[in-house]
């Protein structure tokens, strides 16, 4: 069964639902979790355009936010008595999906658990879907956990 579960986290309620499901699976299978947060090119570019930050300031802010997201998620997992580690990538050369897939291969994950919004149609085309790209390209099974808004 699953012994190494990779969980992308970004601090959103949707990602938190994915994390909670990964915790449930880890308890059942006695798996270890690896949490991953990626500072990607799109977040970086949108931050500069939207908020008028200098590149260095924005990268520092995104890094601090990523560290906070990982710290909180790690505390949540450890409180459940599950082995966990985390990794933060400042990855301006790959998309989030590419970085998650590469990490799954590097860490030899058995499963990837992702919170997803479940967007369809034009919204998915406009916003893109990291979850869909990971689902289509991952070297291991992927569990998509729908957001609370979409689960109803």
Image: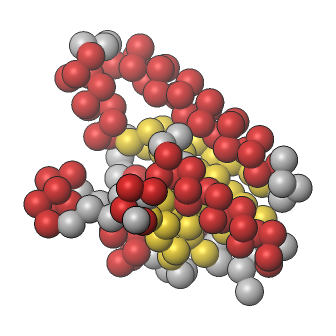
Q: Quadrant of residue 45?
A: top left
Identity of the residue drawn at 53% across and 40% down = 11
Q: Position of residue 123 (x, y in %)?
A: 17, 56
What scheme was used to colour the molecule?
Answer: secondary structure
Q: Nearer the viewer, residue 3 or 145?
A: 145
Q: Nearer the viewer, residue 25 or 46?
A: 25
Q: Is residue 77 above or below residue 61?
A: below
Q: Position of residue 137 (x, y in %)?
A: 39, 76
Q: Is residue 149 above or below residue 74?
A: below
Does residue 108 appear anywhere in the picture? Answer: no
Identity of the residue drawn at 24% across and 13% down = 52
Q: Position of residue 83 (x, y in %)?
A: 83, 58
Side of 25 where 103 appears, left or right = left
The quadrant in which the C terminus is found is bottom left
Side of 5 where 59 appears, left or right = left
The quadrant in which the N terminus is found is bottom right
Q: Position of residue 19 (x, y in %)?
A: 62, 56
Identity of the residue drawn at 59% across and 36% down = 69
Q: Is residue 83 above or below residue 90?
A: below
């Amino acid at each position: 069964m699953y012994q190494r579960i990779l969980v992308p986290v970004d601090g959103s309620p949707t990602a938190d639902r994915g994390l909670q499901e990964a915790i449930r699976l880890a308890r059942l299978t006695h798996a270890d979790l690896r949490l991953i947060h990626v500072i990607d090119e799109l977040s970086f570019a949108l931050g500069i355009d939207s908020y008028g930050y200098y590149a260095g300031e924005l990268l520092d802010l995104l890094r601090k936010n990523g560290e906070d997201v990982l710290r909180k998620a790690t505390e949540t997992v450890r409180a459940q008595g599950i082995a966990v580690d985390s990794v933060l990538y400042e990855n301006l050369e790959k998309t989030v999906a590419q970085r998650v897939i590469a990490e799954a291969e590097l860490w030899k994950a058995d499963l990837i658990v992702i919170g997803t919004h479940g967007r369809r149609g034009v919204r998915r085309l406009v916003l893109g879907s990291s979850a869909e790209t990971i689902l289509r390209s991952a070297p291991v099974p992927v569990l998509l956990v729908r957001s609370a808004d979409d689960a109803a």
